[in-house]
Image (cartoon, rainbow, N blue to C red):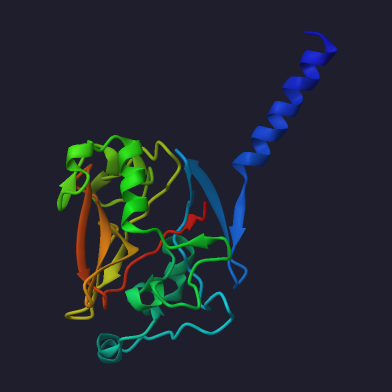
Amino acid sequence: MNVKTAILLFMILILSSSCSKKTVTDIDGNVYKTVKIGKQVWMTKNLRVTHFRNGDSIPHVTDSTEWLALDSGAFCYYNNDESNADMYGALYNWYAVNDPRGLAPEGWRVPTNDDWKELELYLGVKPDRINSLGLRGFNQGEKLKSQTGWHENGNGTDDVGFNALPGGLRHYQDRNFTDMHKFAYFWTSSEVGNKRAWYRILFHNHKGICQYFIEKENGFSVRCIKEK
């Protein structure tokens, strides 16, 4: 190997290492690794920020009755246990997602329903199924799921580095926390009328991806996507 080739290989290794370690930091100082999937760039962990982008605090609501009555942004931790935040992030109602003060870091946003569709098409969901409600695809959810941490060995292959973890939800009707280790619920920023919004589910016992809409009072995880 000549000197020019050796230098070129060294520079490629340095560039590759630098690209693999790209991060974004939220207003609280939490650092998230990122990954490029197709033409999109995603965070590889769920959001855990407690302030809007302008510095205002996001209300931390633990009381179940108060949570149900909200029509403005709020967050909580699964089981009201902050120790869950490092791995699973926080759970947000949709009003926090849509707040004009901004939930995502500067230059980032909560993905739209169409952003999720673009991701799913890239992973191989058929175009004639992309708008269908319920489960779609055959292994696209498995490609997004982390390789450990899922109930009954329902782990994924994490082919694209998305590292989806089963963080569960806070349900709006009974206001209970449920489904940690079993399901991952992700908000989109897209509304369905005044009371509902689109979301996604990944399952421990299925390899597809579920697309549906639900009441905005639910507490779900949030993954952010970089602005183009």
Percent x, y for residue 81?
Answer: 40, 76
Q: Residue at x 44, y 38 (%)?
A: 38
For residue 5, above or below residue 40: above
Confirm whether residue 207 shows in the render.
yes
Percent x, y for residue 159?
Answer: 40, 36
User: In the drawing, does residue 8 fall left or right of residue 88?
Assistant: right
User: In the drawing, does residue 129 fall left or right of residue 227?
Assistant: left
User: In the drawing, does residue 164 fall left or right of residue 39?
Assistant: left
For residue 97, above or below residue 88: below
Confirm whether residue 93 shows in the render.
no
Q: Residue at x 37, y 79 (%)?
A: 80
**The quadrant where residue 99 appears:** bottom left
**The quadrant where residue 2 appears:** top right
Q: Nearer the viewer, residue 56 or 80?
A: 56
Percent x, y for residue 50?
Answer: 50, 77
Q: Residue at x 27, y 44 (%)?
A: 153
User: In the drawing, does residue 167 fall left or right of residue 53?
Assistant: left
Most extreme residue toward the top is 1
How many callouts does the rendering have?
0
In the rendered image, the quadrant that contains the N terminus is: top right
Q: Nearer the viewer, residue 95 or 218?
A: 95
**The quadrant where residue 63 appears:** bottom left
